[in-house]
Image (cartoon, grey):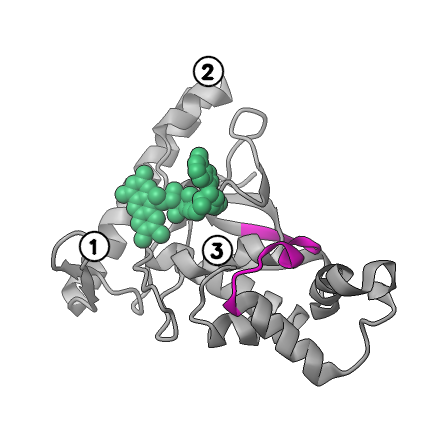
Amino acid sequence: MTDTPRFRSDMTVELVKHSASDTDVLFAARVSTAGERSLEEVGRDPERSKGLINYLLRDRHGSPFEHNSMTFLVSAPIFVFREFHRHRVGWSYNEESGRYRELAPVFYVPDERRPLVQRGRPGKYEFVAGSAEQHALVGKVLEDSYRQSYAAYQELLEAGVAREVARASLPVALYSTMYATCNARSLMHFLGLRTKDERAKVPSFPQREIEMVAELMEAEWARLMPLTHAAFNANGRVAP
Ligand SMILES: Cc1cc2nc3c(=O)[nH]c(=O)nc-3n(C[C@H](O)[C@H](O)[C@H](O)COP(=O)(O)OP(=O)(O)OC[C@H]3O[C@@H](n4cnc5c(N)ncnc54)[C@H](O)[C@@H]3O)c2cc1C
């Protein structure tokens, strides 16, 4: 493994496995009235299907949105995963281990699009761009600090110290990798909290970096379940 630190500003999300479509919502919902025939009725009358999905979302009948599955491979800094793992319901996670493997020196440095200066009080923050000098300073100070902490990690490993102890020298800006599996209902709950969107009935103010991950996930999900995604937006981006 190369021990030269690398700096990144992006997050990556890859949809590695899925069984998720709008029809999964329909057959689950129609069992109420059609019983075991609900699967046969799935393709009938697309307009009614759209209306049914919208009704379920509007009236918060949530369970029909659980009969599907999406697995994402996510690469993001550890501080993003700390926020992510607070989402407990309808999510399964597996993350790379700092005990069982030597961690690669890949660190997060915000790019020039990331607003740097916070104004206002907790719960009512506003972020503004920041000056060119502030951006240059953030890049320099963070990169110096990452180089120093990775050198400390290497020094401890070379002295024979266990990986699980040596990793204490590393910052939460280190990139990690995880698989995250969810269903449309748990994803909608996550998106409602971790994206900022004008259509949201209940505004949220997420940290930009987890929002970057959320946006990439949402794009994949919108492609798989376009009717559900449209109904989510039309009903104020509130999970049913
Ligand atoms: C903008 C923002 C700022 C935040 N700031 C902080 C912070 O400063 N400090 C901090 O610690 N966290 C913070 N959080 C995390 C937040 O408190 C939640 O832990 C996180 O958003 C996950 O939400 P959740 O519990 O609804 O999700 P999930 O764990 O996925 O739960 C989904 C839903 O299931 C139900 N549920 C789950 N567990 C229980 C339970 N034990 N009892 C009853 N109902 C349950 C609830 O209805 C819940 O909404 C912040 C989150 C956001 C979006």
Judged from the image, the secondary structure of the residue bearing numbered disc 3 is: helix
- The image quadrant where one finds ligand 1 is top left
Mark 3 CB within 8 Å of ligand 1: yes
Point out which mark residue 161 bears: 2
Circle 2 SS class: loop
Range of magenta residues:
58-74
What is the distance, in whole Å, between disc 1 and disc 3 at their CAs? 19 Å
Kindly report the distance in space between the C-alpha atoms of the residues bearing marks 2 and 3: 42 Å
- Identify the residue shown where x is 19% and y is 56%: 137
Q: Which amino acid does label 3 sit on?
A: His
Which is nearer the N-term, disc 1 or disc 3?
Answer: 1
Nearer the camera: disc 1 or disc 2: 1
Badge number at residue 189: 3
Disc 1 residue type (three-letter): Gly
Q: Callout 1: helix, strand or loop?
A: loop
Toward the viewer: 203 or 107? 203
10 Å crowding of disc 1: few (<14), some (14-19), many (20+): few
Q: Quadrant of residue 134?
A: bottom left
Q: Provide residue 76's location: percent of width, then percent of height.
A: 47, 50
Left or right: 179 with respect to 239? right
In this rendering, the answer to whether 56 lies above or below 91 is below
Residue labelled with disc 1: 123
- The x and y percentages for residue 217 are 55, 62
- Gap between marks 1 and 2 measured at Cα: 42 Å
